[in-house]
Each structure stands twice: as structure tokens, then as C-alpha cells.
């Protein structure tokens, strides 16, 4: 029997603090028990998680970057040299329950895209609008405007 070579997929996760990047990471790891989410703490600097997808030859490496201001500054400074190399996917998370920080969040995303463009590094980017809850009143027009600004 011939063993197929494993495919390594590197995913970077960025966003402001409290956007719940680590919650999404847990879901990607299929750790969805409620107790996993209640014990989360803010990510300091970044965390690297490696796992193999069951029944495939794919191995994943997820880099979950802390979103506090001091970490964001450091991540932007080191993005290309230290983090981006070998990445296939970038997931950017925006907390839709925090409209007062939409501008700051989009500015951070724009800084990341500028660096990628500067180095001609092409990577798939997904933007997640996270923390939607039926109990929270969010104006549809506000979300539509946010989506338009992301596309721009």
C-alpha cells in the first residue's frame, strides 16, 4: 500500500481583541463543547495549533494572533518576515456587535492587505462577521454598509 504525502495547510487568523478568533479556531478543531468556550482567555501574542484532519492526508497549522493593540502593532511589523511565509489562507474576524470599532478593524485589515500587496504575496482571505446573536439588535443597513466597505 502506498502512503500519500500529507498536504500542510497554514491558516492565519487576525482580528481585533474580543472578536473571538479563538472560538472559531476551536470550531475548526471540532471542539464545540460549551465548556471549551467558557474558559477562553485573550490570546497573548499568538498561538500555533497543529492538527490532522480525520480521513484525509491534510495537516493544518493555525496561527491565532492576539488582537490587543500592542500585539497588532508587532504583528504588522513582522507579518511578512515571520508569519506569512507558506500560508494558504488568512481568516479575518470582525465582531459585528462592536460597531464603534468597525473603522479600527477595517484599518487593521487594510494594513495586512497593504503588506501582502507590497510583497506580491497572494493568499485566500476570508472575512468572518462574527458574534451574530438573535438576541442582539443589529441594524441590517449597518451590516450591509460594513460588507460594502470590506469589499472595497
Image (tube, rainbow, N blue to C red):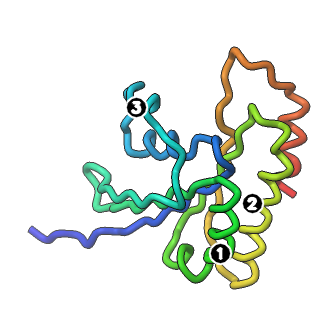
Mark found first going from the N terminus, 3 or 2:
3
Residue 13 falls left or right of residue 50 = right
* Residue 98 image position (x, y, % from top left): 77, 36
Residue that numbered label 2 is attached to: 109
Q: Disc 3 designates what residue?
A: 32
Report x, y in % for residue 152.
Answer: 87, 58
Q: Secondary structure at mark 3?
A: loop
Please state the horizontal and vertical placement of residue 2, each as a whole percent of the image. 13, 71
Q: Earlier in the sequence, mark 1 or mark 3?
A: 3
Circle 1 Cα neighbour tier, 10 Å, few/some/many (<14 / 14–19 / ≥20): few
Circle 3 residues within 10 Å: few <14, some 14–19, many ≥20 = few
What residue do we see at 47% from left, 38% from top? Answer: 40
Residue at 49%, 76% (x, y): give it. 86
SS at circle 1: loop
- Picture quarter with the N terminus: bottom left
Measure the C-alpha gap from mark 3 to mark 2. 27 Å
Q: Is residue 13 above or below residue 85?
A: above
- Rounded to the nearest whole Å, what is the CA distance between mark 1 and mark 2? 15 Å
Q: Return the residue at label 1.
A: 122
Residue 125 rendering spot, x and y as whole percentages: 65, 60
* Picture quadrant of residue 101: top right
Amino acid at each position: 500500500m502506498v502512503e500519500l504525502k500529507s498536504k500542510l495547510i497554514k491558516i492565519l487568523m487576525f482580528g481585533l481583541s474580543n472578536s473571538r478568533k479563538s472560538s472559531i479556531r476551536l470550531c475548526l478543531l471540532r471542539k464545540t463543547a460549551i465548556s471549551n468556550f467558557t474558559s477562553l482567555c485573550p490570546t497573548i501574542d499568538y498561538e500555533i495549533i497543529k492538527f490532522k484532519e480525520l480521513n484525509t492526508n491534510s495537516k493544518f497549522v493555525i496561527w491565532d494572533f492576539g488582537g490587543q493593540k500592542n500585539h497588532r502593532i508587532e504583528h504588522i511589523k513582522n507579518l511578512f518576515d515571520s508569519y506569512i511565509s507558506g500560508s494558504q489562507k488568512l481568516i479575518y474576524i470582525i465582531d459585528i456587535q462592536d460597531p464603534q470599532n468597525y473603522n479600527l478593524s477595517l484599518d487593521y485589515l487594510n494594513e495586512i492587505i497593504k503588506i501582502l500587496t507590497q510583497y506580491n504575496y497572494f493568499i485566500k482571505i476570508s472575512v468572518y462577521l462574527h458574534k451574530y446573536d438573535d438576541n442582539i439588535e443589529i441594524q441590517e443597513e449597518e451590516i450591509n454598509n460594513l460588507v460594502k466597505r470590506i469589499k472595497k
